[in-house]
Image (tube, grey):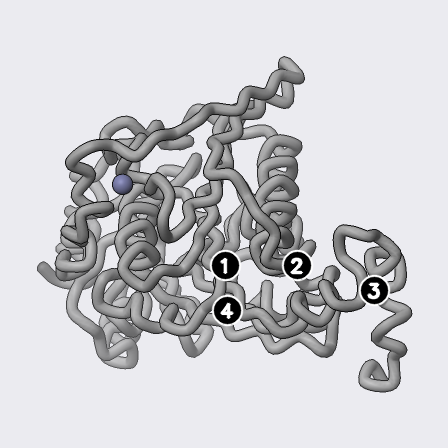
Amino acid sequence: MPSKRNVSEMYSRQILLPEIGVEGQLQLHQKKVAIVGIGAVGSVTAELLTRAGVENVIIIDRDCIEESNLQRQTLFTEGDIGKSKVNIAQEKLQKINSHSKIRAEAINLSAKNIDLLQGIDLVLDCTDNVETRFLLNDFCRKEKIPWIYAAAIRTSGYVMPILPSGPCLSCFLTPASLETCDRVGVLNTITTSIAALQVTIAFKIILGKEVEPILTYYNIWDTMSKSITVKKKQNCQTCQGNYIYLHESGWKFPIRFCSSGIFQIQGQSQDLKNIKEQWQKIGAVVDDGETLRFRNLTLFKDGRALIKADSEKEAIVAYSKYIGT
Ligand SMILES: [Zn+2]
């Protein structure tokens, strides 16, 4: 039934815009876009692109849906809690636009697997962590792929297109200078606004229009925006072709997630059946075929565990106790 839908009617209101037109619409259909992270910014970005007819999309996220996500992660509803973000997002996006070809990757993007972004026309940063952003920065510079940095925290956020020949993320940020949104909170109108800005720049890049490598700051509570000119830093490692983040052998340490006190520990790949049997001796286990959930812990086949804990140390203790060292 959806295949009989009149496709041009679906896009009629944006084809009318001189900025898009019929030619632009065809470009939107053809280009391949990666959305890294399908949380608050990623949900809105993915939905807007899908509705606009960007049909070749890959979405990547390692996380499961939690109750605290629903305030701002617009693709998810109460019944989705506990399920994989990318799988639910794929399902919903496919319902919005049946012509979409959405590839869902429930993985922890790292130096080991980032090659799956080869051949992508544009990468959108919708992550909530520093490691992935610097990884994308190195990969995209090496592969000459444009990408768009986006971050939102509290009531404000930043967006910047990072183009193959312009200044890169490392030119103006160091990993230590990034604040995490852990426990400081975030307003749903800022994540939505930052996503809208990111998607608008994405349209321009897809259509081959010129975009300035300007960092936009926006505070929605104070209704205040700033355009910040970023210059290439002398001796920038990434701009000089030293892609240190591509040489990391994946994350070795727990990473605290945004706003919810969840840590990730990447261990060896696991035999879930075996672990399930052990855990069942001490408590209830939820098995959805992809993950096992037990107490404050979610375990994936690849050995990755998400652990709700008050400290990094407590997360490591739980990992060693229930999974192994
Ligand atoms: Zn640089």
Q: Residue at x 58, y 69 (%)?
A: 31
Spatial separation of the CA atoms under disc 2 and disc 4: 12 Å
Secondary element type, mark 4: strand
First along the sequence among labels 1 and 2: 1
**Amino acid at dot 3:** Tyr
Spatial separation of the CA atoms under disc 3 and disc 2: 12 Å
Could you say where residue 196 lies in the image, as x and y percent from the top left?
65, 42
**Amino acid at dot 2:** Leu
First along the sequence among labels 4 and 3: 3
Secondary element type, mark 1: strand
**Amino acid at dot 1:** Ile
Which residue is situated farthest in the left direction here? Answer: 325
Q: Residue at x 74, y 67 (%)?
A: 23
Quadrant field for ligand 1: top left
Please give the residue where the numbered disc 4 appears in the rendered image: 58
First along the sequence among labels 3 and 2: 3
Could you say where residue 145 lies in the image, as x and y percent from the top left?
40, 60
Please give the residue where the numbered disc 2 appears in the rendered image: 49
Please give the residue where the numbered disc 3 appears in the rendered image: 11
First along the sequence among labels 2 and 4: 2
**Amino acid at dot 4:** Ile
Q: Nearer the viewer, mark 3 or mark 2?
A: 3
Crowd class of label 4 (few under 14; some 14 to 19; many from 20; radius 10 Å): many
Crowd class of label 3 (few under 14; some 14 to 19; many from 20; radius 10 Å): some
**Residue contact at pointers 1 and 2, CB within 8 angstroms:** yes
Q: Left or right? Give the position of 248 relative to 156.
A: left
Q: Nearer the viewer, mark 3 or mark 1?
A: 3
Name above or below for residue 217 compared with residue 317.
above
